[in-house]
Amino acid sequence: MEIAEKIQRLMDERGITPYRLAKETGVSYTGLSKILSQQTKNPQIDSLKAIAAYFGKPVDYFTEEGDFSTPEWATAKDIRDFKRMLEEDSPIMFDGVPLDVESRQRVMDILTGLFWDAKKQNKKTYGRKAKTDTNNKDTE
């Protein structure tokens, strides 16, 4: 997903117009319009920082290939597993009622954190380094 698409999605979820976003972030309306129309593929970092701060997202949310921040230790297989989990587009329900867009995003953000925490713990417990440490203890 492109930077423009991510910004537009966040704006839609919160009911924010480009004019309001420009005014409240200090990014020029013209500059924001160029980003949203994808005339500007790589916006200035100051503009991206202001937009990220406004939406409460890290800057890499807009620059990463997914809708998530990938930890530096994640392998290509880990990333595929995560994308597969996110692609399941079934509605998220609470008490039999589908969640609204903003609540769904919050749940997905929590699931993202839980997913990466579980992967990291799994690598510590069962990963190559953990196996090597166990083997070294056996030979001592």
Image (cartoon, rainbow, N blue to C red):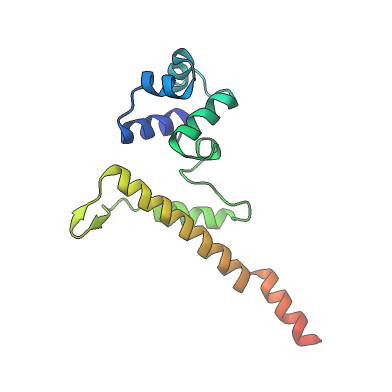
Q: Is residue 71 above or below residue 67?
A: below
Q: Residue at x 73, y 76 (%)?
A: 133
Q: Position of residue 37 (x, y in %)?
A: 42, 19
Position of the C terminus, as image quadrant, is bottom right
**Quadrant in the rendering for residue 55:** top left
User: Is residue 7 visible in the rendered structure shown here?
Assistant: yes
User: Is residue 87 visible in the rendered structure shown here?
Assistant: no
The number of numbered discs placed on residues in the rendered structure image is 0
**Quadrant in the rendering for residue 128:** bottom right
Q: Position of residue 14 (x, y in %)?
A: 32, 34
Query: With 96 as the anchor, is 68 left or right in this view?
Result: right
Q: Is residue 59 above or below residue 95?
A: above
Q: Residue at x 23, y 58 (%)?
A: 94
Q: Residue furthest top?
A: 30
Query: With 59 as the anchor, is 109 left or right in this view?
Result: left
Q: Residue furthest right?
A: 140
Q: Is residue 51 above or below residue 37?
A: below
Q: Position of residue 10 (x, y in %)?
A: 38, 34
Q: Is residue 42 above or below residue 101?
A: above
Q: Residue at x 48, y 43 (%)?
A: 66
Q: Position of residue 27 (x, y in %)?
A: 49, 20
- Is 72 or 55 nearer to us in this picture? 55
Position of the N terminus, as image quadrant, is top left
Q: Residue at x 43, y 34 (%)?
A: 6
Q: Residue furthest front?
A: 24
